[in-house]
Amino acid sequence: MVHLPFAALAFLLLTGCGQNKGVQETPPPSWVQSRPLSNGHYIGIGSANASLTPGEALRSAKERAAADLAGEIALRIESASLLETEERNGHVQEDFSSTISSRADERIAGFEVVDVWENASGCYVYYRLNKAQHAAARKARQEQAIATALDELKSGESDIAKGQVISALNHWGTGVLALEEFWNEVNKGSHKGETLTLEPHLIRKMREALRNIELVPAVNRVTLRAENNFKFPLGVHATLNGLGVPSIPVKYSYHNGTYIKKATEFTSSEGILVALIDGVAPERPDENFTGSLDVTRLLKSAALKPVIVELVGDINAPTFRIPLDVVLPSVFIQASPSSGLAVQQHDAVIQALRGALLAEGYGMESTSNRSDFTISFNLRSEHRTPVGDFGNFHTAYITGSISLRNATGKLIKEIALDKVKGVQLDPNAALNLALSNAAEAVEKKHAPDLIRSLR
């Protein structure tokens, strides 16, 4: 092959094709009409139609020649060993294909421009790359990539021995990516007296680390009671080979009777997290508290690229379940000693509240010293005598308050009763009607409010 003088070749590359319309055309070289064959070189031929934009035809021809050269190299790639064993749903294959494309310039580094030819219709570019030089450069890169992967393997093992899972995953993922250009080949390295196929080994190490994390709750059953305000701080210890694992995301959920409550907590430097359980109703579809390793967030914390996450695949995350019991408190209901009405006149409101609490599962006690809570009614009455046109009717009003106290006597809640009335011809009948109306208000309005406070 006769090479163009450097000055002439440089002139063509700078000015571009299709710009010398007045120059007498020379006949096309043989490589334009018939693709050259070479045992010692990879060949890349690119062409582009003439363009009114200066340099556009040359730029397109050069890109196509580079792509053609990269294509020749890609056609000689061996079967993709990593992909054959680890491909999942096509995502890895797609990423690998894009990797070949994105690394094309690197793969054809050191190529030479053999010739550039133009005529009125377009531009042609001829590249070639010495196979021996390319193979030597590629082998050097591969050896360096294997050395890097082995270093990352060792660093990950050192971290995992200390319980540093996130750092270990990052090292092993970095080791797989170090070999990315060579995923199409079997990359072997010597480690601890063994010869390993590195990418599959690194991926297996990542999977094993995730599967071997243990989540151990501090108790095997949680009981929510009045004395702990129906709250429970559940401790969970995340360990790997007996060591606490820090910064691990653990997701948990439980049904509170209305909806499924979900949250995620991260373990401390000792591998411990605390999940606060509260607001749980006695009746609910699922009585279990469920916790599991949040693999997605863990891999994100390790800053792994999507292709590595795909290679790791689905993991059966460590999970635990423990039952949640809700023990409703016992309640003593009484007329307050300072109430303005007689004890027996409280019967209607006491029975109304008692029925509402029993329906929700609360226990009733006959004395305050045996109960978890005491509810006291402090009632007062007002009476108006008949006047004017309504001279035959008496009106009675009931006002007052309801107080809720815990076993130590601490006031938990106080509710002011709405003013209710009763109108009858007889004053006692008017008072009884007002008490009946007050009982209805307690059942429908105030009992739900008290029940929320009891929980």
Image (cartoon, rainbow, N blue to C red):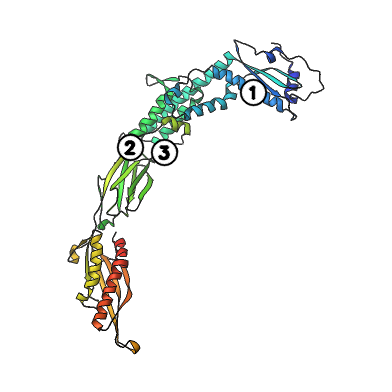
Task: Please tell me how crowded label 1 is: few (under 14), some (14-19), or many (20+) other residues with Cα within 10 Å.
Answer: many
Vertical comparison of 394 with 378: above or below: below
Position of 2 with respect to 314 (left or right) is right
At label 2, the amino acid type is Pro
- The numbered dot on residue 346 is none
Q: Is residue 267 visible?
A: no
Task: Please tell me how crowded label 2 is: few (under 14), some (14-19), or many (20+) other residues with Cα within 10 Å.
Answer: some
Residue 450, quarter of the rendered image: bottom left
At label 1, the amino acid type is Arg
Vertical comparison of 389 with 286: above or below: below
Name the spot of residue 133 as percent of width and height, x first: 58, 15
Q: Secondary structure at mark 3?
A: helix
Name the spot of residue 413 as percent of width and height, x first: 31, 66
Image quadrant holding the C terminus, namely: bottom left
| Mark 1 or 3: the one toward you | 1
Vertical comparison of 426 with 436: above or below: below
Name the spot of residue 229 as percent of width and height, x first: 29, 57
Q: CA distance from mark 3 to mark 2?
A: 13 Å
Residue located at (26% from left, 74% from top):
436
Image quadrant holding the N terminus, namely: top right
Q: Secondary structure at mark 1?
A: helix
At label 3, the amino acid type is Thr
**Circle 2 is placed at which residue position?**
318
**Circle 3 is placed at which residue position?**
296
**Circle 1 is placed at which residue position?**
64
Q: Is residue 294 visible?
A: yes
Name the spot of residue 41 as percent of width and height, x first: 61, 13
Q: Residue furthest bottom?
A: 388
Q: CA distance from mark 2 to mark 1?
A: 51 Å
